[in-house]
Image (cartoon, coloured by chain):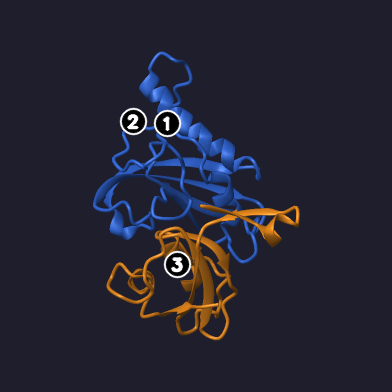
Chain colours: A blue, B orange
Amino acid sequence: MLLYRYRGFTLVDITNTNVTAPTDQFKRNQQRNWETVQQILSLRVQLIDFKYLGCTTCDLQKFSFGINYSGMHNVWNFEFAVEHDGIFSTDIDRYGSLKDDFKITPIILNLSETAKPTLPLFYASGPEKNIYFIAQKPE
Amino acid sequence: MSVTRVNGGAAPVVTTGRSLAMYTIGLTNVHVGYTSVDSDFEKLVRAIETVGTVEILGTPSSDAFRVAISGAAPAATSGTASLQGICNAAVATTTVAAYTF
């Protein structure tokens, strides 16, 4: 089976803590953001190999976040695969429906994120862009 | 954000929107293999989206493509913060021209 793999990058704290009980609200909220990502992605596809890859502090110059963010910040990344090519495409934009789905989705702030958007939302484009995706080569 | 009544309100249609700025982005061979993973075209679109929302994206052809951006679109060609500076940082030397219509 050919898999089409994507990698996502975000400035939102989506740490996969696996905390589902409200005993530790901080970790629960991190997990809530992670679940938000998972649920949005699951709207259109059956996710395969959905993996949390961790958080690193990096210079944003190497990334494609909005121009409102610069300098060293925490960047979270994750990976997933789908079975169908072009499943997120709208017209000629390979990531079109991904961007539409994430656009202005609420998130929880005041966790470990260092780059804060004006509003607690995912922005998929524009100067506040805090999430984006890159397709990997099919395997 | 503005609300415009089409045909002075005579037609039962209301559209909402923001100002659009349209640009022609030129890069040698940008139309070649533009559907490939992480092509120059993809890199350019990703870079352009850091400054504004891409509303309309044209299919690349003859070493160029056209894009309409809403939001805080920068000037086409002045300084590193310009659209051209942002595009050049993403790929290589591009040409960026504002398209008037």
Residue A18 higher or lower than B25, as above or below: above
Q: Is residue A3 visible?
A: no
- Residue beneath disc 1: A108
Residue located beneath label 2 in the image: A111
Q: Is residue B31 left or right of residue A53?
A: right
Residue at numbered disc 3:
B43
Q: Is residue A129 visible?
A: yes
Instruction: For label 1, count other residues whose C-alpha is less than 10 Å away and answer few (under 14), some (14-19) or many (20+).
Output: some
| Rendered residue at 31%/34% (across/down) | A112
Task: Report the Cα–Cα distance between label 3 and label 1.
Answer: 29 Å
Three-letter code for the amino acid on which mark 1 is drawn: Ile
Q: Quadrant of the C terminus of chain A?
A: bottom right
Q: Residue at x 60, y 53 (%)?
A: B16
Q: Are marks 2 and 1 in contact (CB under 8 Å)?
A: yes
Marks 3 & 1 on one chain = no
Question: What chain is tagged by disc 2?
Answer: A
Viewer-nearest residue: A39 or A97: A97
The local crowd at label 3, few if under 14, some if 14 to 19, many if 20 or more residues have their Cα within 10 Å, is some
Expressed as whole percent of the image width and height from the top left, the position of residue A37 reads 51, 39
- Asked if labels 1 and 3 touch by Cβ distance under 8 angstroms, the answer is no
